[in-house]
Image (cartoon, rainbow, N blue to C red):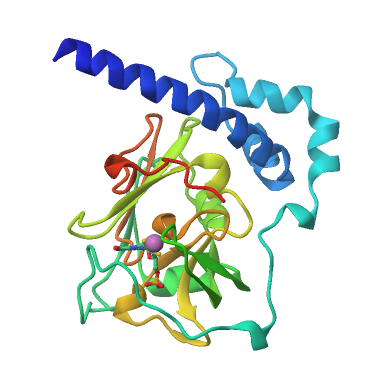
Amino acid sequence: MKDEQDDVDLTVQRLSRRGFITAGLAATACYGAYKWLRSRPREDGVEWPLRRALLANEALAQAYYSPSRLSPRFEPRDITRPRVNGRLGLVPDVDADAWRLKIEGAASPVALTLAAIRELPAHEMITELRCIEGWSTIVQWKGARLRDLMERFPPPNPVRFLSMETANRGYYIGLDIESALHPQSLLVYEMNGAPLNWLHGAPLRLAIPIKYGIKNIKAISTIRYTGVRPADFWAERGYDWYAGH
Ligand SMILES: Nc1nc2c(c(=O)[nH]1)N[C@H]1C(S)=C(S)[C@@H](COP(=O)(O)O)O[C@H]1N2
Ligand SMILES: [Mo]
């Protein structure tokens, strides 16, 4: 049992080291993330390694920020017929008025109405939703940047991860902070010009085109900041934890 745990720890360390490099590059590519990271306080007076790396690369960080680092955007004529995949954690007829998005690990607990999320600056994008099984759809999304929500309700100390889960924890994902801060990571409430239906994750889902479909969690109920790499439904079943593409 002890040995097994050691194995798991080693694997996690190796994976997060690898992920850390990728995450570092992604953050360097994103000046917004960089600014956000710089504005975070130090933890126990120790510089966050990623932050140190970013400080050393301040000039690079700006030079790297270019739209070519974004996931490709498409035209309205490219939108395809939607496809429903994955119903874990979905429930029909969610009462939108009673629904709240909970944020745990912020300075104080947060519970937001959908109206409050709609008040954040709205962004639209037409991007690819690529399932790890080999198919993809082109979807128009409308929602708020996860980054804007995080800036409004930041964690009191720097964190490297956040998790998202459905109400009954039927589905859950983990994200590295840099991916969460990506400008195309949207908390969406509209799909192809209409409010989300329950099969696509009403009232709120994540659209994160830099990641495979598995990270595009539908029917989000809770977002949690954490310093520890969170459990992830499909990573627990053998898929890559970062699931970028
Ligand atoms: N709650 C929840 N979200 C989920 C899933 C799921 O089973 N449950 N499946 C994921 C997978 S594997 C894919 S490919 C996309 C598909 O999104 P769509 O049904 O809107 O096309 O949702 C993702 N989000
Ligand atoms: Mo998928």
Q: Residue at x 78, y 57 (%)?
A: 67
Question: Residue 146 placed where, x, y %?
Answer: 52, 56
Q: Is 173 rendered above or below residue 121?
A: above
Tell me if 15 is positioned left or right of 72 in this view. Answer: left
Tell me if 97 is positioned left or right of 244 in this view. Answer: left
Choose top left, top right, bottom left or bottom right for residue 97. Answer: bottom left
Q: Residue at x 56, y 53 (%)?
A: 147
Tell me if 62 is positioned left or right of 221 in this view. Answer: right
The one nearer the camera, 197 or 243, is 243
| Number of dots carrying numbers | 0
Q: Is 41 rendered above or below residue 123?
A: above
The one nearer the camera, 76 or 110, is 76
Question: Residue 88 placed where, x, y %?
Answer: 23, 63
Quadrant of picture, ligand 1? bottom left
Question: Residue 173 placed where, x, y %?
Answer: 35, 49
Choose top left, top right, bottom left or bottom right for residue 3. Answer: top left
The one nearer the camera, 95 or 66, is 66
Q: Is 91 rendered above or below residue 221?
A: below
Q: Residue at x 57, y 68 (%)?
A: 128
Question: Residue 224 placed where, x, y %?
Answer: 35, 45
Q: Which of the image's four quarters has the N terminus?
A: top left
Choose top left, top right, bottom left or bottom right for residue 37. Answer: top right
Residue 123 in view = no
Residue 104 in view = yes
The one nearer the camera, 118 or 69, is 69
Q: Residue at x 26, y 59 (%)?
A: 166
